[in-house]
Image (spheres, rainbow, N blue to C red):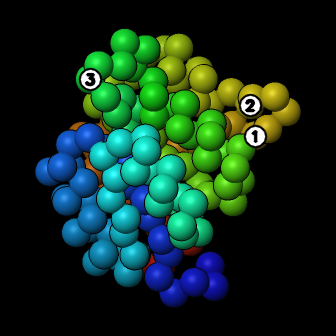
Amino acid sequence: MVNNHPKVLIVDDVEDWQLTLRGMLKKLGCEVFLSSSLGQAREALSKDKIDLALLDMRLDERDESNVDGLDLAEEIQSKYPDTKIIIATGYSTQEALQRAWEPIRGRPKLVADFIPKAEIDSLLARVKVALSLEE
């Protein structure tokens, strides 16, 4: 990657998780943007070229579908096809996994990776791969 400081957008409604990830990603040399809502995420995406979006699948406890993060992933893929997407979640269903991994309307699979939040080391390893970062 030509950019020495990849731009990563973290979209999650849990502030402690955002701050934890931000600290770890900054140590990797990333420029990090935080968002706790769909609106904030859309604004950040419209202002900067984001290299990687780390999305929670369930961004709002009131969302009965529990997949607003996947909705955002589809929007990102449609508007910003060069932005890689990783879903990091504590909640998933078989239907959500299928939606994340299957190609949609002739496009490649929706997300680059889908990982439980509890697997932080694996998440960071996958971020490094997605951004082509060296150890």
Residue 61 image position (x, y, % from top left): 26, 23
Residue 120 image position (x, y, % from top left): 27, 51
Vertical relation: 4 (above or below) 113: below
- Tell me if residue 104 can be seen: yes
Which numbered disc flags the more N-terminal residue, 1 or 2? 2
Vertical relation: 37 (above or below) 5: above
Cβ–Cβ under 8 Å for marks 1 and 2: yes
Kindly report the distance in space between the C-alpha atoms of the residues bearing marks 1 and 2: 5 Å
Kindly report the distance in space between the C-alpha atoms of the residues bearing marks 3 and 2: 27 Å
State how many labels appear.
3
Query: What label sits on residue 81 in the rendered view?
Result: none
Quadrant including the N terminus: bottom right
Please tell me whether mark 1 sits on a helix, a strand or a loop.
loop
Q: Decide if residue 49 is on the left or right side of residue 55.
A: right
Which numbered disc flags the more N-terminal residue, 1 or 3? 3
- Residue in the picture at 81% in, 28% down: 105
Name the image quarter holding residue 30: bottom left
Q: Amino acid at mark 1?
A: Pro
Q: Which residue is mark 2?
A: 103
Q: Decide if residue 13 is on the left or right side of residue 9.
A: left
- Residue in the picture at 49% in, 14% down: 94
Q: How busy is the neighbourhood of tag 1: few (under 14 within 10 Å), some, or many (20 plus)?
A: few
Q: Amino acid at mark 3?
A: Glu
Query: What label sits on residue 108 in the rendered view?
Result: 1
- Tell me if residue 127 can be seen: no
Q: Amino acid at mark 2?
A: Pro
Question: Foreground residue, 83 or 36?
Answer: 36
- Residue in the picture at 55% in, 31% down: 71
Query: What label sits on residue 61 in the rendered view?
Result: 3
Which numbered disc flags the more N-terminal residue, 3 or 2? 3
Frontmost of labels 3 and 2 is 3
